[in-house]
Image (cartoon, rainbow, N blue to C red):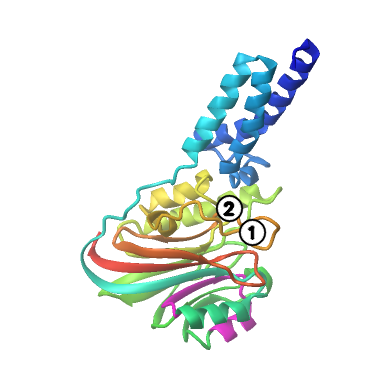
Amino acid sequence: MDSPSRRRTAARAAGALLAVPTAVAGCRLAGADAVTPVPQLLALLPWSAVPAVPALALATAARRPALVVWAAALLAVTVWLAQPYGPDTTRARGPVTARLTVLASNVEFSGATAELLAVIRRERPDLVFVSECDPGCVRLLATALPHRAEVAAPGPAGSVVLSARPLTPAPALPGTLGMPGATLRAGGKDVRLQLAHPLPPLPGRVAAWRRELAELRDFAAGYRGRSVVLAGDFNASQDHAAFRAVLDSGALHDSARIAGAARTGSWPQDGPLPPFAQIDHVLVSTDFAVRGARFLPVPRTDHRALLVELDLHALP
C-alpha cells in the first residue's frame, strides 16, 4: 500500500472503524449512559475492541501515527474497562446462620414456564425470581414452591418471587413491568427480597429505563446495611452507569462477579451467537457470601437462568 490514495483510503477506513467504539468507551469512562444508541451499545462494550484490531492494521499500513495511537489506546482502554466491576468478595463474617439457593429467570412471555419448572425440580432452589410470568405461569410454578409474592398481570408485566419458606408481603416497586417484593425470615434475620425488571433501553424508552433503574437504586439505598437479595432481569450490565449506581447506593454485590463469572453472558441465548450481555443478576448485601453461581440454559426463552448459592452470615 504505497500509493498516497491507498493510504488515504486505509486511513479513512481506520477512522470509520474507530469512531463508534471510541464514543461508547468515552461514555463508559465518563459514567454516562447518554442517549440511543449508546445504552444499547454499552451492552456490547467488550466487543468494542474487535474493530480496533483491523483499524490498527489499516492505520499502520496508512503510515498514520496518530491513528495508530488512537487504535492502540482504544484497545487498551476497552480491555481495562472490561475488568469486573466492584470488589471480589463481600467480606461477610461470623457464623453462617442460613444457606439459600436463589434462581433468577426471565421466561419470555411465560413461554418457558414448563421448562423452568423442570429446572426448579432438578436444582431445588429455596427462592426463585421469575420475570414475564403471567398468572397461569405463577400457578404452574407454585406447584413446586408454595409461597409467593407476585404482581399478577398478563404478558411481560407479570412477575413473581417464589419461596420454599413462608414470606411476608412487601410493597412492589413502581414500574411498567411487575417488580414484587417480600421479606423472608432466615438465620434470625429479616431478608428483604426484591425482584428487578426495569424496561429495556429500547429507542424511545431510554428515559423510562433510566427512571426505573433509579427506582431500584433508591430501593437499594433505603435498605443499605440490611439483609437484601435483589434479583432478576435488570436489562442492564456492569457497563451501564445506571446499574452501577444500584450496586453502589446499597453496597450490594453482584453474585456472578464474586463467583468469577462477571462476563458470562445471559442474553440473548436464542440467537446465532452465544449470549454476549450479562443483564440477569442476583445482588446481595454484605452479610452474604457467595459459594457459587451458574448460568443455566432454559429452552424457549432468550435468557439464561442464574443459579446462586449463598451463605448468610451473622455479620457483614
Q: Which label was assigned to residue 268? A: 1
Q: In the image, is residue 135 part of the stretch drawn in magenta?
A: yes
User: Would residue 54 be found to the left or right of residue 80 on screen?
Assistant: right
Count of numbered labels shown in the rendering: 2
Residue at disc 2, secondary structure = loop
What residue do we see at 35% from left, 67% from top? 310
Please tell me which residue lies in front, 157 or 15.
15
Residue at disc 1, secondary structure = loop
Q: Which label was assigned to residue 200? A: none
Indicate the amino acid at tag 1: Pro
- Tags 2 and 1 touching, CB below 8 Å: yes
- Name the residue furthest top: 4
**Taking 251 as reference, is 162 above or below it?**
below
Q: Tell me where residue 316 sits by quadrant.
A: bottom left
Q: Tell me where residue 68 sits by quadrant.
A: top right
Indicate the amino acid at tag 2: Ala
- Name the residue furthest left: 94
Q: Which residues are magenta?
A: 124-141
User: Would residue 91 be found to the left or right of residue 183 on screen?
Assistant: left
**Taking 205 as reference, is 38 above or below it?**
above
- Name the residue furthest right: 5
User: Would residue 252 be found to the left or right of residue 115 on screen?
Assistant: left
What residue do we see at 40% from left, 48% from top? 248
Q: In the image, is residue 163 part of the stretch drawn in magenta?
A: no
Question: Label 2 belongs to which residue?
Answer: 277
Residue 177 pos. (x, y %): 61, 65
Q: Residues within 10 Å of mark 2 (few under 14, many from 20)?
A: many
